Structures are given as structure tokens and as C-alpha cells.
Image (cartoon, helix red, strand yellow):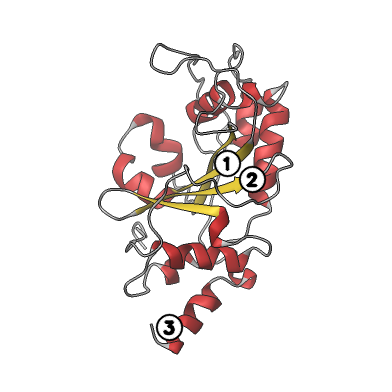
Amino acid sequence: MTRLALAALALLGQPALAQAQAYRCAVPATVETPRAEGPTDREPARLLPIGGYTLALSWAAEYCHGNGGERSAQFQCGTGNRFGFVLHGLWPDGEGAVWPQYCRPAALLPGATIRRNLCATPSAQLLQHEWAKHGTCMSDTPDAYFARSTGLFARLRFPDMDALSRVRGLTAGQVAQALATANPGLSPAMMRIVANRRGWLEEVWLCLDRRFRYATCPAHQAGTPPDARVKIWRGDR
């Protein structure tokens, strides 16, 4: 890669460009009531010690590219809202490769809780899922869980993803470096870039220790190899 291209990638990660992504979110007066979720034979309850955490972010444009026609995706993809990265969830990790989940029964989320968090996680059902599967293992109440996850999300800064998507020969490692440059204290080793089988960016997973500080990701937490080519869907932009 030329020095010019390297300099361009460095600029893409600067915090001054954090708000370069278009962002528009209007919560309706009435929000969808989610269905209850809990453990199943395929996804059983697991009460295990917590070894750390993963803050999972989804790239909304790619999600809407594949799922925009679904009813559950209308708030995120079909109501005039526009998102860059959204908060998938905050997940407790185990001390090994197996994690705790569905630690206790989860009641339906109150509408007020959904409304407060819908611009970070733009799906009532996903909010219900995250509380039931992950939040019940780490917080006494859904409001405490979402305050923690949205607080971590709000402190993040993002590179200009539109410009990044136009870098020729973009790799997963370069995406990680751009995110790390925008967030002091975060390094590429502390995140996993997740692309789908077609090579399009889907998610970024940030690894945290027990005190919710950025930490080097465990070896068993796989992601897209740093030298793999990655494309970023821009939607209709």
C-alpha cells in the first residue's frame, strides 16, 4: 500500500470524523410489543462464571440490505430512519469458550424501556432477546443492563464509513485499524471484524475485561482474518 493510501486510512480514523455517518432516528409514539424469549433445547440456560464481555455492533446498511423487507426490520430499515453502526448487544463471556446465557426468567420489557433504547438497538424484539439471553446473567434489571451497554456504545467514535468503503482493496485489518485510531486505548487486537460469506462487513465485536475495559480478544473468539478483503455496503448513498 502506498504512503498516500496509508495516510488516507489514518485520517479516516480520526475522532473529528466521528459524526460523518448519516444518522436519523425518530421513535414512534407506539412501539412494538415483543414476544417472550427464554431457553430452549437448542439454546439451554447456562449459569457460568463471567470471564469478560463482548460489545457487539452491527453495520445497519448491510443488515437492511439482506433483511429490509422483514416486518421486524421496518423501524431500522423502512421508516425514514438511517443508522450507521447500531448496538447488537453486550454479552457476558465465559472463562473459556462457553458463555453464560438465559440465567433467569425474563419478563417482557416495558414500553418505556424499549423507547429509551430503540435508537441504539432499533428492534424491540432484539432488545427483548438481549435482555433475556445476556442481560439476565449480568444485571438485576433491564434498565441497569441497557444503561451499561448503551453507555459503552455512546462513548465510541467511528471513522467515516462512507469514505472507508471506497478504499480499494480494503481489508478487515484496515477496518479494525480505522476504528482503533478513532478510539484511544482501543487496538485491532481488542476487536473482531465479522464479514459474511460474500465478504460484506456485518459486525464488529469489541472485547472487554471484567471491569468493562478494552482487552485483547481471546484466541477462541474467531473473526474475519485481518488480511481478508472486506466490502462495506453503503445502502442507497
Q: Amino acid at mark 3?
A: Ala
Picture coordinates of residue 135, whole percent (x, y): 62, 26
For disc 1, the marked residue is 54
For disc 2, the marked residue is 208
Q: Is residue 78 left or right of residue 158?
A: left
Instruction: Identify the mark nearer the N-term, 2 or 1.
Output: 1
The answer to whether one can see residue 159 in this image is no
Which mark identifies residue 145? Answer: none
On the image, which quarter does residue 200 sit in?
bottom left
Disc nearest the viewer among 3 and 2:
2
The answer to whether 104 is drawn above or below residue 215 in the figure is above
Q: CA distance from mark 3 to mark 2?
A: 31 Å
- Name the residue: 55% across, 34% down: 28
Disc 1 secondary structure class: strand
Picture coordinates of residue 190, whole percent (x, y): 57, 54
Q: Nearer the viewer, residue 68 or 7?
A: 7
State the quadrant of the N terminus. Answer: bottom left
